[in-house]
Image (cartoon, helix red, strand yellow):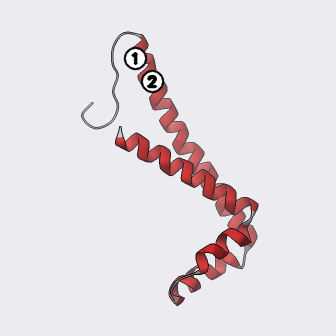
Amino acid sequence: MISERLAETVAMLAIGDGLLCAVQPERHTNLWLNGPSWWQRAWRPVVDRPNVTRLLGLAGVGFGLWLASREWSRAEHELAGERRGRRVMSGVGA
């Protein structure tokens, strides 16, 4: 149960972060520039290329949707098992 919730949370974060990157890449990536100089150097190429940031954001949205769809399929499978009168469990110890 914890792994399903964690996966759903990661999916929501990836979708939200990806949308922010796609819609407002400069503003969103500038938020990440605070920190040590090595951190700023690591982020500078992304900040200076908003279209790359948009592309990475859309990839994040795709990843989040893919991850969420895996959880939806698992939940539907468990629900179908309960409707048939037996409990179908996924995950560790199932």
Q: In this view, does 75 lie above or below 55?
A: above
Neighbourhood count class around disc 2 (C-alpha, 10 Å): few under 14, some 14–19, many 20 upward: some
Q: Which of 4 and 60 is in front in this view?
A: 4
Q: Could you say whether the residue bearing mark 2 is in a helix, strand or loop? A: helix
Tag 1: amino acid: Gly
Q: Could you say whether the residue bearing mark 1 is in a helix, strand or loop? A: helix
Q: Is residue 2 left or right of 19 when viewed as pictured?
A: left
Q: Where is residue 15 drawn, in percent x and y?
A: 61, 51
Q: Quadrant of residue 29?
A: bottom right
Q: Quadrant of residue 31?
A: bottom right
Q: What residue do we see at 49% from left, 48% from top?
A: 9
Q: What residue do we see at 55% from left, 37% from top?
A: 69
Q: What residue do we see at 41% from left, 24% from top?
A: 78
Q: In this view, does 57 lie above or below 8?
A: below
State the quadrant of the C terminus. Answer: top left
Neighbourhood count class around disc 1 (C-alpha, 10 Å): few under 14, some 14–19, many 20 upward: some
Separation of marks 2 and 1 at Cα, in angstroms: 6 Å
Pointer 1 residue: 81
User: Do residues under tags 2 and 1 come within 8 Å of each other at their CB atoms?
Assistant: yes
Q: Is residue 81 above or below residue 65?
A: above
Q: Where is residue 67 drawn, in percent x and y?
A: 52, 44
Tag 2: amino acid: His
Q: In this view, does 80 lie above or below 47?
A: above
Q: Can you name the residue that lies furthest to the bottom here?
A: 37
Q: Quadrant of residue 44?
A: bottom right
Q: What residue do we see at 36% from left, 10% from top?
A: 85
Q: Where is residue 8 drawn, in percent x and y?
A: 49, 43
Could you say which disc has been placed on residue 77 in the image?
2
